[in-house]
Amino acid sequence: MRVFSLNLEQTGKIAEKFVRKLKKNTQAVIICLKGELGAGKTTFVQLAGKSLGIKKNITSPTFVILKSYNIPQIKSRPQFKKFIHLDTYRLKSAAELNNIGWPKIIKNPENLVFIEWPENVADLIPKESILIELKVIGKFKRVIDIWFKKKKRAKK
Ligand SMILES: Nc1ncnc2c1ncn2[C@@H]1O[C@H](COP(=O)(O)OP(=O)(O)O)[C@@H](O)[C@H]1O
Ligand SMILES: [Mg+2]
């Protein structure tokens, strides 16, 4: 699925719509975000978190690798409990990710996981993960490609 964003507000709406489509699974739901520096990966995650009702400021985890937030619960529908944001830009090896509990994180169906720079840890990303690619086409314009399934990605 390809969408265009002309400004931050539109990216917010795209992120909100995206989050609403997510369903819990038997394992964590993982969202990989690809795109050059400044493409809007962190911004997309921030806006997705906001739409889930997270009040805390979601800040870039570039230096800490991982940040975790509680998702406010609404009784009417089953929800993810933890919003986990990773940025592996500064990771020296994929093994480091295992040291911060990655295997446990991806097993837990209560987790909604966003990971920037998944390329750096490609071997540790489950096949079922969702891919979002952001491209800059103007100061405020972005192309956002979302692949819910890997098969569709292969066709491109
Ligand atoms: N339409 C848009 N969607 C998302 N970000 C935008 C848009 N227009 C401008 N921006 C800006 O682009 C920058 C993206 O930075 P950031 O999200 O940190 O990128 P990344 O995490 O990919 O390096 C932010 O300063 C953001 O405000
Ligand atoms: Mg970032």
Image (cartoon, grey):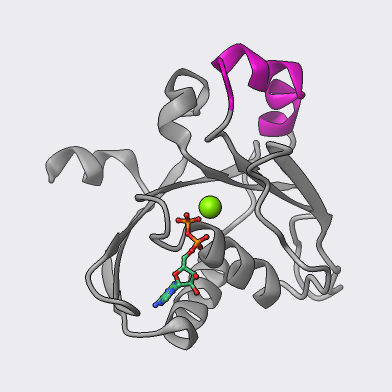
Left/right placement of residue 24 relative to residue 54 reads: left
> How many labels sit on residues?
0
Residue 34, percent from left and from top:
39, 47
The chief SS type of the magenta part is helix
Q: Where the N terminus falls, by quadrant?
A: bottom left
Residue 94 forms part of the magenta stretch: yes
Q: Residue 86 is drawn in which quadrant?
A: top right
Q: Residue at x 65, y 54 (%)?
A: 60
Q: Quadrant of residue 72?
A: bottom right
Q: Residue at point 46% right, 35% down?
A: 118
Rendered view: 55 above or below 130:
below
Up-down relation of residue 25 to residue 118 (above or below) = below
Would you say 119 lies left or right of 70 here?
left
Residue 111 vertical position relative to residue 78 in the rendered view, above or below: above
Residue 127 lies in the magenta stretch:
no
**Magenta part of the chain:** 91-107
Left or right, 23 with reference to 120: right
- Using residue 16 as the reference point, say whether residue 79 is left or right of it: right
Residue 117 x, y percent position in the rendering: 47, 38
Where is residue 78 shown, x and y percent of the image?
A: 76, 62
Where does residue 39 sit, x and y in percent of width and height? Answer: 38, 60
Q: Quadrant of residue 91?
A: top right
- Residue sitting at 49 percent across and 24 percent down? 121
Q: Where 144 sits versus 91, above or below?
A: below
Q: Of 23 and 87, which appears nearest the observer?
A: 87
Q: Which residue is most to the left?
A: 156
